[in-house]
Image (cartoon, grey):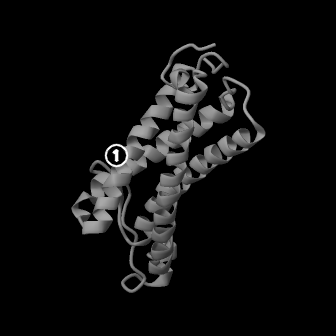
């Protein structure tokens, strides 16, 4: 059930590839939406991003419970530091990107929905709802400055993710094509070593 040097657990492999597939779907969709202003895709992007965030939290729980996978072989100090940096960059970006997107939308006055099911309804606008009513409703009012800031955070971490994923893929290909050490095959579910 847990990872070993020779074989990763089915849970580790499944969570890795689910997150990878969702990121490879969401990133181009978000880029397309922002580039051509095709905001009719917003519900799909937000819903899938919310599901991704839940999967990422499950993956983090599993990672901290299970530990980081042991390297298949012995690597230079530089490779070890680079791998650790890339993995932690992926972790931070994978948490920050969907979280900043969700909170940005909420601060902008949008519902948080998942495929038509409203998780958190729209927040009232300060200009319409008096401050004392806001406190009685126990909601956070819209905040356009926070919305704009978190939108920039979301975009920043999207690009950080692109760089980290590129380095991650390059590292996996190096392991597979140059080192021939089984790292990639292990992430595909094979037993190595």
In the foreground, 181 or 139: 181
- Quarter of the picture containing the N terminus is top right
In the foreground, 105 or 160: 160
Residue 91: image location, x then y, percent:
59, 47
Tell me if 29 is positioned left or right of 147 in this view. Answer: left
Q: Secondary structure at mark 1?
A: helix
Q: Residue at 48% of width from left, 70% of height from top?
A: 152
Residue 75: image location, x then y, percent:
72, 32
Q: Residue at 51% of width from left, 34% of height from top?
A: 173
Residue 33 in sight here: yes
Say if 151 sits above or below 161 in the image. below
Q: Residue at 50% of width from left, 81% of height from top?
A: 132
Say if 3 sits above or below 137 in the image. above
Question: Exactly how many numbered labels are in the figure?
Answer: 1
Residue 33: image location, x then y, percent:
29, 62
Residue that carries the numbered disc 1 in the rendered image:
25
Residue lying at the far front of the rendered structure: 178
Residue 22: image location, x then y, percent:
39, 42
Q: Residue at 37% of width from left, 71% of height from top?
A: 109
Residue 103 in sight here: no
Say if 22 sits above or below 157 in the image. above
- Quarter of the picture containing the C terminus is top right
In the foreground, 139 or 117: 117
């Amino acid at each position: 059930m847990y990872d070993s040097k020779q074989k990763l657990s089915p849970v580790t492999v499944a969570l890795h590839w689910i997150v990878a597939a969702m990121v490879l779907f969401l990133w181009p969709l978000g880029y397309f939406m922002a580039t051509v202003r095709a905001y009719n895709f917003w519900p799909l992007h937000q819903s899938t991003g919310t599901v991704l965030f839940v999967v990422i939290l499950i993956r983090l729980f599993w990672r901290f419970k299970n530990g980081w996978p042991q390297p298949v072989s012995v690597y230079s100090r530089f490779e070890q530091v680079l791998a650790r940096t890339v993995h932690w960059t992926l972790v931070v970006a994978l948490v920050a990107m969907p979280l900043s997107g969700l909170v940005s939308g909420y601060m902008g006055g949008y519902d948080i929905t998942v495929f038509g099911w409203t998780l958190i309804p729209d927040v009232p606008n300060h200009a319409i709802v008096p401050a004392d009513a806001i406190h009685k409703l126990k909601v956070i009012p819209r905040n356009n400055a926070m919305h704009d800031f978190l939108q920039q955070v979301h975009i920043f971490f999207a690009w950080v993710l692109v760089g980290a994923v590129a380095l991650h893929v390059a590292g996996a290909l190096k392991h597979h094509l140059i080192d021939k050490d089984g790292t990639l095959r292990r992430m595909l579910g094979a037993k190595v070593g």
